[in-house]
Amino acid sequence: MFNTLNQNAERWALLVFYVMLVLTMAVEVVRREVFAFSSIWGEEIVRYSFIYLAWIGAASAVRERAHIRIDVILHYLGNRSKALIYIFGDLIMFLVALIALYWSFETVAVSWKFGSVSHGLRISMVWFLMAVPIGFSLMILRLIQSFIHDIRALRTGEPVFEGNKMFD
């Protein structure tokens, strides 16, 4: 079960938030165009679903090494050099993610302290602001997994996982 969760956690979460976004948006369009009435809560659900989609999608991209990068030079390097470059890049991303995680928790703490709520749903903003720390936490987890795989590839000399190519 852990292996299945490890492989598909982001996909399932992305699916849930994407379906919620699309269905809510469709309902709101029909309500606005057919019934000349719209709700505040629909707009908020779409907005916060999109925010969760972005942060969980970023973590998924880290797992799949799907972020935009210039890899022309990597085609001319050996397996060990590629592994070192990927480890270096992941290390920088790891440090940035740690700093961002720290500062994103401060925003959540301030919202928690003052009890801010959303305008339409009247739900604590903590639930929505947690998208950023959740996203960075998932990124850190996936970067740690990436370090393990890259160090193993470096030790054995096997090819490092480079992610799927958009154009081949």
Image (tube, rainbow, N blue to C red):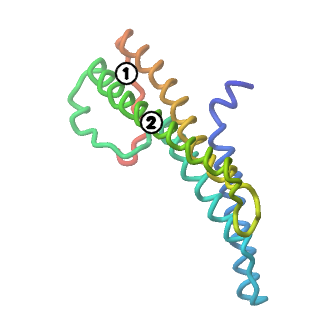
**What residue do we see at 55% from left, 29% from top?**
141
Element type at mark 2: helix
Element type at mark 1: loop
Q: Observer-nearest residue: 113 or 108? A: 113
**What residue do we see at 72% from left, 76% from top?**
28
Q: Which residue is mark 2?
A: 99
Q: Amino acid at mark 2?
A: Ile
**What residue do we see at 69% from left, 44% from top?**
12
**Looking at the image, is mark 2 or mark 1 nearer the viewer?**
2
The quarter in which the N terminus is drawn is top right
Q: Position of residue 98 (x, y in %)?
A: 47, 33
**Structural distance between the alpha carbons of marks 2 and 1:** 30 Å
Q: Position of residue 24 (x, y in %)?
A: 73, 68
- Residue 95 is left or right of residue 103, and the answer is left
Q: Amino acid at mark 1?
A: Pro
**What residue do we see at 64% from left, 59% from top?**
48
- Residue 135 is left or right of residue 30, and the answer is left
As drawn, the label of residue 159 is 1
Furthest toward the front, the residue is 114
- The picture quadrant where one finds residue 70 is top left
Q: Relative to 1, does residue 164 appear above or below in the rendering?
A: below
Task: Assess whether mark 1 and mark 2 are in contact (beta carbons under 8 angstroms).
Answer: no
